[in-house]
């Protein structure tokens, strides 16, 4: 989600996000986690399909079975 809107909400099999110090991959049953995000490509995999977003600055949180990303700017670069 960004200050303007939520770009994606739903189930995913994997999330790859641009953390401030490198890319981070999140799979089901990931341990609780919090990190700052930098600028880069965010991938949300849903089985064989992948949604791509360009994000800039924010944070990612993994808690329970949910991944939340709050970013300053985001845009869809390709949809499934």
Image: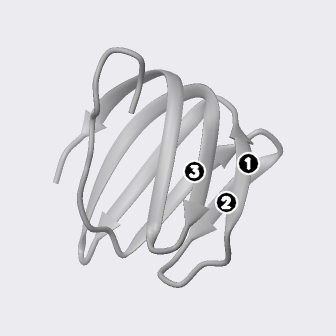
Q: Quadrant of residue 11?
A: bottom left
| Residue that label 1 marks | 35
- The residue lying toward the viewer, choosing from 40 and 33, is 33
For image coordinates 34% across by 65% down, the residue present is 45
**Please, what secondary structure does the residue beneath circle 3 have?**
strand
Earlier sequence position, callout 1 versus callout 3: 3
Mark 1 lies on a secondary structure that is: strand
Contact, CB < 8 Å: mark 2 with mark 3? Answer: yes
Q: Nearer the viewer, mark 2 or mark 1?
A: 1
Local packing at callout 2 (Cα closer than 10 Å; few below 14, some 14-19, many 20+) is: some
Give whichever of discs 2 and 1 has the lower sequence position.
2
Camera-side residue: 13 or 63?
A: 63
- Residue at mark 1 to residue at mark 3: CA–CA distance: 10 Å
Q: Residue 24: which disc?
A: 2
> Are the residues flagged by discs 2 and 1 in contact, CB closer than 8 Å?
yes
The answer for how far apart the CA atoms under marks 2 and 3 are is: 5 Å
* Disc 2 from disc 1: Cα separation: 9 Å
Q: Is 41 above or below relative to 72?
A: below
| Residue picked out by circle 3 | 17
In the rendering, at what x and y percent does residue 9 appear? Answer: 25, 50
Dividing the image into 4 quarters, which one contains the N terminus? top left
Q: Is residue 74 above or below residue 30?
A: above
Coloring basis for residues: one colour
Residue 65, position in %: x, y?
A: 45, 74
CB under 8 Å between callouts 1 and 3? yes
Question: Left or right: where does residue 15 sit relative to residue 77?
Answer: right
Taking the view exactly as shown, the residue that stands out farthest to the bottom is: 29
């Amino acid at each position: 989600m960004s200050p303007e809107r939520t770009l994606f909400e739903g189930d995913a099999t994997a999330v790859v996000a641009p953390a401030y110090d490198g890319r981070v991959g999140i799979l089901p049953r990931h341990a609780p986690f919090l990190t700052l995000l930098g600028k880069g490509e965010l991938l949300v995999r849903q089985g064989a399909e992948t949604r791509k977003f360009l994000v800039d600055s924010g944070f990612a949180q993994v808690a329970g079975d949910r991944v939340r990303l709050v970013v300053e700017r985001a845009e869809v670069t390709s949809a499934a």
